[in-house]
Amino acid sequence: MSQRARSDELSALTDIAAQVNCTQDLDEILAGALETTLNVIGEESGEIFLLDQDTGNLILHTHRGVSPAFVAEESIIPLGACLCGQAVATRQLLATTDLENDPLRTRGACLRERFSTCVRLPLMARGRALGLLAVQSRARHAITQADRELLMAIGNQIGIAIANAQLIKDAEQRRATLHSVMNSLVDGLILINRHDRVTYMNPCAEEILALPASTIVGQKLDDLHYQIASQAADPEIKLEQLRLAATCHEEAASVEIALTEPDGRTLQARFFPIRHAGEQSFGLGLILRDVTREREVDEMKSRLLATVSHELRTPLASIKGFATTLLRRDVQWDEASRRDFLSIIDEESDRLSELIGNLLDMSRIEAGELAVEPEPIDLIPLLRETAATLAPLSNNHHLQLELADPLPLVLADARRTRQVLRNLIENAIKYSPEGGSVRVTARADRDRVQVSVADEGIGIEPDQLDRIFDRFYQIDSASTRRVGGTGLGLPISLAIVQAQGGTIWADSQPGAGATFHFTVPRATASPAVAE
Ligand code: ADP
């Protein structure tokens, strides 16, 4: 290497240090440092590699003065394989002035470039190897102690630059991960700093409150409080007490807020203090959970309890009444009356057992244990028999069957399919109090048979069409309330149809009747079937 003035060395080191301090971009720092190193040390070419901590390979990052073939060959170097790998593995500066005669320590690429003098310096920071600085020349010349010291000083600067860049990258990655986690939360999250200003609001909170983050972030907590209160059914929301409790590290309590805007949701709000391990709280988080569905289910369950008690009491009262009447010793009933009373007891017992059966089915569904045993069956006799047993239910209704006969065999559980059909026909009769026709139709298509039950009754509003299949759901209108029921029939039908691999849905013209359809898979699919 050439003789240098001490001032050149200092100015090279100062240049590299300045770049490390001022530049954020690691590529730029490494390219500049390599150029400065080659200029001051007087070697022909050089490379900087970064150590991939996962694979343990050196990855070529920056190079000067080497051929494209060399770059391609040396882009990834395994540790320990050559002078480069050995320098990093041993964490020592390694040098040779006679590479051709040092075959154990070289790789083909360096020989092909005809390098003779090579210096390999591990780039370290805080005791960890982070990469490698390689410089080399074709000319053979000595590497002085001064060269080594200068290279090591330069290596230290580059090591610091790499460590800083990795720290920044790690911090950015952690920040991005945290941000993605907060943004992906299924609960609303709002962060408030110690000066009571909102610093962050996640997309779920925006959606729950129907407020864009831009209108909330930067505002005082009081403004957020005001915004929420202005949407609440009861403006006296207890957020302030909650906040105080959280600030004083009291046990986290929550309040429920019923919103009138945007769509009448119920929110559960809970504050929590944000602190680093052992440190004082430096802000607050506010979690907003949409508990609308849970509250609706709670409400439906209490309604179900009331309805079921009512529905149980009615047949029980009847059974008890007629049994007591029959048992009276002071009255002699003629045979016809006795039969009438007994048949009422019989029917009411059936009602009771159907209701209990439905409750048991529902609990099986909730436990995921509803069993169906599909086998190939012909739907025609099943539809005819079920309709025939239900026809006597009402004198007011005309039950019609329109079946494409013959129908292909379907894969279904006969008892369960009968249960679905009975439920749909009973509903059709129940919800058409003025009477009219109830039409049961069945037709086959390529891989399923579709059964439909149409009535001319009160019909269903479009926004209720999906909800009627929810557990315990009943449309809360005077006309449906009047006829009783438990809201169990349709969710049970849905579970049965789905367990058989079919679908169930309804369409309706409110006031002009409803049609319920369900499908059952064919036992064997057919390429062409007449509708
Ligand atoms: P239930 O009839 O015992 O209340 P279902 O689950 O069978 O329970 O039905 C749920 C709700 O769907 C009923 O309460 C009723 O409001 C509505 N519904 C069902 N069938 C019909 C129909 N054919 N016409 C109008 N409304 C219906």
Image (cartoon, helix red, strand yellow):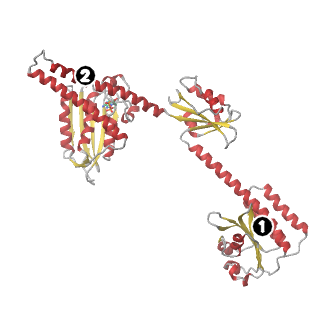
Tell me the distance, in whole angstroms, between the alpha carbons under discs 2 and 1. 97 Å
- Residue occupying the far left of the picture: 335
Q: Position of residue 477 (x, y in %)?
A: 37, 24
Residue assigned mark 2: 317
- In the rendered structure, find residue 34 and report the number of the disc placed on it: 1
Q: Is residue 112 visible?
A: no
Considering only order in the chain, which callout, 1 or 2, is on the residue closer to the N terminus? 1
**Where ligand 1 lies, by image quadrant?**
top left
> Few, some or many C-alpha atoms within 10 Å of disc 1 (few <14, some 14-19, many ≥20)?
many
Which x, y percent locates residue 195? 71, 33
Give the residue at x 24% y 34%. Answer: 439
In the image, 529: left or right of 265? left
State the image coordinates of residue 278 (x, y, percent, origin top left). Answer: 68, 42
Does 110 appear above or below 268?
below
Between 383 and 321, the residue placed more toward the observer is: 321
Q: Which amino acid does label 1 sit on?
A: Leu
